[in-house]
Amino acid sequence: MSDLSRQTRFRFFDLEGKTLLLTGATRGLGKAILPNLLAQGLNLVVVSRGMDRMQAVRAELGVSDDRIKLYDCDLSDASAVAATGRAILRDGMPLDGILNNAGIDTREHFARSDDAFWQQLFQVNLFAAVSLTRTLLPLLKQSPQGRILFTGSVLFELGAGCLTAYTASKGALVGLTRSLAHELKNTTITVNCLVPGAVQVEKESGTSESQQRLIGFQSVARRLTPSDLTGLVCLLLSQAGGGICGQSITVDGGIVHPLASPEGQGARLDPPWPLPD
């Protein structure tokens, strides 16, 4: 998705003119949902690494810096994250929401992982989100409908070998969501966590067999795309989603555990599943 003409056709009119900060917007899910966010009338503050890449994305979308303001920040560097948060505060812009989307999913055997590996992954996936959100909380409290969104992963519920650090960091975001929602009781701010499943983004280049295998894990018989998440994102940012708080909401196409699969359980029926048409 590279231009505003390809957005999903829905509209939350109260998002017009609101400002959303988004991390990790030069590739993957973050980049893919930009057209839909702009189509809602949102102004965006993008925090990502590589000013050239961010400028290229903005040019591709055909919008000016009035709609997308850019902050170059290496989220793996704690001091850079803190400095970026302070810079946004100093710039004095209004802020209505934060979508902490950036994340890395480096794979490693648990026995071979070291402290530096865990520190870097948690810095990008958890600590950067904590730092930016904490620093910018005063701006969110000034908004009539402040929104904080974290991006988890279905792997927290499933578990994933060779992704222990990633899975642990995403589980921490779930706990953060629940606790922060309670702590911000009686403010205008809601806190929620998006939990994507196997969403197809541009970095994936699997074979047709691997694509079909992923589809076979789901109740929805197709690959999920970023568009499957944008409606939920916009709902949670809008007044219509104002009663949803402290929740982790999963969009995974209905992942089916092998023990619950109709193929496995249905084989024990007489006649076996599926019934003929």
Image (cartoon, rainbow, N blue to C red):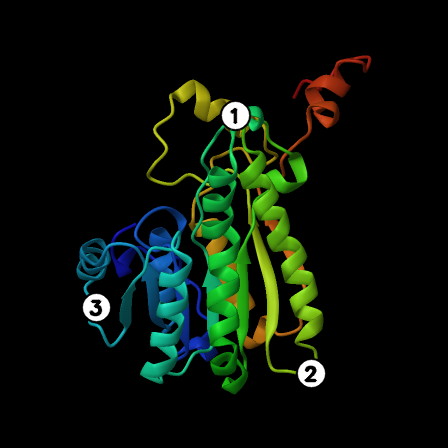
Q: What residue type is labelled 1?
A: Arg
- Which disc, if any, is residue 112? 1
Specify whether residue 245 is in view.
Answer: no
From the image, state whether disc 3 or disc 1 is nearer to you: 1
- Which disc, if any, is residue 4? none
Query: Taking 271 as reference, is 122 above or below it?
Result: below
Q: What residue type is labelled 2?
A: Asn
Residue at 80% over, 13% down: 268
- Which disc, if any, is residue 186? 2
The residue lying toward the viewer, choosing from 180 and 116, is 116
- Which disc, if any, is residue 63? 3
Query: Taking 275 as reference, is 153 above or below it?
Result: below
Q: Mark 3 or mark 1: which comes first in sequence?
A: 3
Q: Residue 65: x, y in percent?
A: 22, 73
As helix, strand or loop, the secondary structure at mark 3 comes to loop
Q: Mark 2 or mark 1: which comes first in sequence?
A: 1
Residue at 52% over, 30% down: 113
Q: Distance between the residues labelled 3 and 1?
A: 45 Å
Q: Residue 39: x, y in percent?
A: 34, 67
Q: In which quarter of the image is the C terminus?
A: top right
As helix, strand or loop, the secondary structure at mark 1 comes to helix
